[in-house]
């Protein structure tokens, strides 16, 4: 039987990934990957002129399957002795048992690398059979986005695949939100938006889902919103809350100045800020900083 660890050596080079990229996507430390390469001949990566390892799409997919089994407690020596088909069968079998978040995550990454919409959709539907929508987003989709660089990173490794995945996830969030009842007489009206220059709207779409799920009236202006548009809406509709999500400082390098401007244009509405860089604003008076969507849900239960 042909060993699985040899089959990727002749793969077509579709993308070049560094060993750090592989570490980020699989959750396996670069040092561990180097040991596996030496001890088990697990991968035969190409070498650049600088002698740095480079991996292609097939290398990555192979390592995702290896990582999936490894994270579930299977010894690397046993995995290295398996054939390609045996590893594929084992990774598919792992989808049916808990904990299975990592298995779904890897399935989504593989589908994304291949632009395989049918596989992506089937994986998502299978997830919804085993968990509710909120768990699906927080335990699988967020880590998935984190790994491929959609949510927190600015150095996009595979931009075409990221746009592919983002579009599919965006549609899921919109459909789920549309399926919730719209409150007719809500006490609180939330205006949600991303700063001008910020285009990554997946977290904001999930926040809109949570707001509507908790019976709040929501108006979402979406990504890349000029301050003038926010001020005009506030003047016309007098929302009770303004909520934004700050992913990086690239769109608004001076966060304090930006939030001060939002506060100034809020018309007295409560300003809520979430996101990875929101913690930098904890010194700012008169706004509410929430470090996670779970904190947001707690806040919504009391306001």
Image (tube, rainbow, N blue to C red):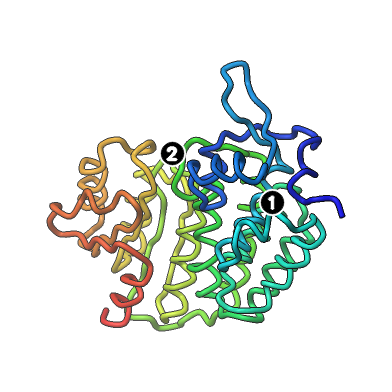
Question: Does residue 217 appear to the left or right of 133 in the view shown?
Answer: left
Q: Is residue 298 above or below residue 224?
A: below
Instruction: Report the residue marked by disc 2.
Output: 197
- Judging depth in this view, the residue of 175 and 164 nearest the camera is 164
Q: Mark 1: which secondary structure?
A: helix
- Judging depth in this view, the residue of 9 and 95 nearest the camera is 9
- C-alpha span from label 2 to label 1: 26 Å
Disc assigned to residue 212: none
- Judging depth in this view, the residue of 119 and 278 nearest the camera is 119
Numbered marks: total: 2
Q: Is residue 230 above or below residue 128?
A: above
Residue 241: percent from the left, percent from the top? 30, 66
The residue that appears at 29% across and 68% down in the rendered structure is 240
The residue that appears at 31% across and 57% down in the rendered structure is 235
N-terminal of the two: label 2 or label 1? Answer: 1
Quadrant (top left, top right, bottom left, bottom right) of the C terminus: bottom left
The residue that appears at 56% across and 69% down in the rendered structure is 101
Quadrant (top left, top right, bottom left, bottom right) of the N terminus: bottom right
- Judging depth in this view, the residue of 83 and 107 nearest the camera is 83
Instruction: Report the residue marked by disc 1.
Output: 112
Few, some or many residues within 10 Å of mark 1 (<14, 14–19, 20+): many
Residue 29: percent from the left, percent from the top? 48, 47
Q: Tell which residue pokes out farthest to the right in this image.
A: 1
């Amino acid at each position: 039987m042909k060993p699985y660890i040899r089959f990727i050596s002749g793969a077509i080079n579709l993308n070049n990934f560094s060993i750090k990229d592989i570490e980020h996507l699989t959750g396996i430390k670069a040092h561990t990957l180097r040991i596996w390469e030496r001890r088990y001949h697990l991968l035969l990566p190409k070498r650049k002129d600088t002698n740095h390892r480079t991996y292609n799409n097939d290398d990555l997919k192979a390592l995702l399957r290896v990582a999936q089994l490894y994270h579930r407690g299977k010894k690397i020596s046993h995995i290295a002795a398996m054939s390609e088909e045996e590893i594929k069968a084992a990774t598919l079998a792992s989808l049916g048992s808990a904990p299975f978040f990592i298995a779904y995550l890897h399935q989504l990454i593989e589908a994304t690398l291949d632009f395989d919409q049918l596989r992506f959709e089937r994986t998502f539907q299978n997830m919804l059979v085993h968990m509710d929508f909120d768990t699906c987003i927080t335990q699988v989709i967020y880590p998935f986005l984190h790994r491929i660089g959609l949510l927190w990173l600015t150095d996009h490794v595979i931009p075409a695949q990221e746009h592919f995945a983002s579009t599919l996830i965006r549609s899921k969030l919109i459909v789920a939100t549309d399926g919730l009842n719209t409150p007719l007489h809500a006490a609180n009206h939330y205006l949600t938006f991303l700063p001008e220059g910020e285009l990554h709207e997946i977290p904001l779409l999930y926040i809109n889902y949570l707001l509507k799920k908790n019976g709040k009236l929501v108006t979402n202006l979406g990504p890349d919103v000029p301050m003038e548009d926010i001020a005009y809406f506030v003047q016309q509709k007098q929302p009770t809350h303004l909520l934004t999500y700050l992913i990086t400082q690239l769109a608004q390098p001076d966060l304090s100045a930006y939030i001060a401007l939002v506060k100034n244009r809020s018309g007295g509405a409560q300003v809520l800020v979430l996101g990875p860089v929101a913690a930098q604003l904890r010194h700012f008076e008169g706004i509410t900083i929430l470090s996670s969507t779970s904190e947001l849900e707690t806040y919504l239960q009391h306001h």
